[in-house]
Amino acid sequence: MTLLHTLFHDPAPRSVRLNVAMAEGLSLPDGSICVMRPRAGEQFTPLPMDRLQMVQGFAPDYTALQAAGHTVSATPLPAPSALICLPRSKAEGLGLIAQAVAGGAQCVMVDGQKTDGVESVLKAVRARVAVGGVVSKAHGKLFWFSPGAETFADWQLAPQAISDPDHGAFQTMPGLFSAGEVDPASRLLAEHLPDTLPARIADLGAGWGYLAAACLARNGVEELHLVEAEATALELARANITDPRAQFHWADGTQPLPLLAVGGVIMNPPFHTGRTPQPALGLAFIDSAARLLTGRGQLWMVANRHLPYDRKLSERFSQHQILAETGAFRVWHASGPRSRPAQNPSRQRRERSR
Ligand SMILES: C[S@@+](CC[C@H](N)C(=O)[O-])C[C@H]1O[C@@H](n2cnc3c(N)ncnc32)[C@H](O)[C@@H]1O
């Protein structure tokens, strides 16, 4: 179990709704069932495990689903049935429906909590096709339909182009972080990077590559490693960052990356899983940055200013300072990574100053 999975919510509601749906007569065609965007630890009984084909591009969930014995792919595969586990973004949820239909699904099940916006997706589907049934239970809904001749092709996700005055054109995608615009916190960090950076840099949680582009525009960079858990974001980063100094890693940034050792880390760490704020994720990113950095390594990081990162920075770095602050965000520079967290950094500081 990784940190992300210990943060995960109740795994059973989908199973509760699927049981009721089966009892009410939902029947599936023979063959595989493509389960799109399942999270680690979720339960899908009474669906037969040997027919489930999990589709998950988020590396931590991918790894955990595989460890639980599922067949997992990062990209959708054709299947006669599909179960869409609604993600946070409605555009992405509709895109998954279109993908399932394009993959030949004759039975499409859509499941989500109220907080996932399932009601609004149900309304959008009902405007196009007859819905076979709806189960409302455990603070969410499961509904199913047969697409017939409807292709939902206009719901397919398509890249959105944006142009940044400093770093040029980028492709982004609905459902990803900062889709359709540069994130203001990342822009603030980019503005406060020094003119010259260490030769080997890692961009932790690189997204579609904005901060990577800002790094490559600085002097001194010879190698830049983009580490990103979301496969679609990394794919876009590959398209956006064509500089040969860039290397791309589809990986969970909270886990050790043993082959990487760098002189600099830049990051705008994630602090959500789904809709729930999870500052622990940012703390895990600070730990990772300290592990990745060599002896004199430096970290440049931006985050919402209310997030409690100061103490962790003191534990993992011998020095840190605030480089910039706005009403919403804070940019830090830290140096001198510690291989192990300091036990009581404020006491150590007091002792050093004696
Ligand atoms: C706040 S966004 C920053 C994105 C990009 N650096 C930017 O500035 O636009 C955080 C990024 O971390 C990624 N992410 C979330 N959890 C991750 C994990 N465990 N490992 C690696 N990346 C992760 C998200 O997909 C997202 O792209």
Image (cartoon, helix red, strand yellow):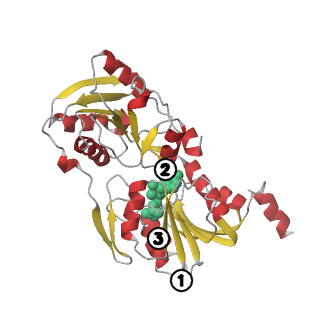
Instruction: Please say if 18 is above or below 170.
Output: above
Residue 102 visible, this angle: yes
Instruction: Please say if 336 is above or below 310.
Output: below
Amino acid carrying label 3: it is Ala
Label 2 Cα crowd, 10 Å radius (few <14 / some 14-19 / many 20+): some
Which quarter of the picture shows residue 30?
A: top left
Amino acid carrying label 1: it is Asp
Residue 171's spot in the image, x, y percent? Answer: 32, 65
Q: Which residue is mark 1?
A: 195
Q: Give the side of residue 103 with respect to residue 194, left or right.
A: left
Instruction: Please say if 191 is above or below 338.
Output: below
Q: Which residue is mark 2?
A: 59
**Nearer mark to the viewer, of 3 and 2:** 2
Residue 153's spot in the image, x, y percent? Answer: 18, 48
- Does mark 2's beta carbon lie closer than 8 Å to ligand 1? yes
Q: Earlier in the sequence, mark 3 or mark 2?
A: 2
Residue 139's spot in the image, x, y percent? Answer: 38, 27
* Along the viewing direction, whichever of 53 and 45 lies nearer the viewer: 53
* Along the viewing direction, whichever of 300 and 322 lies nearer the viewer: 300
Instruction: Identify the disc placed on residue 128.
Output: none
As drawn, the residue found furthest toward the right would be 354
Instruction: Identify the disc placed on residue 212.
Output: 3
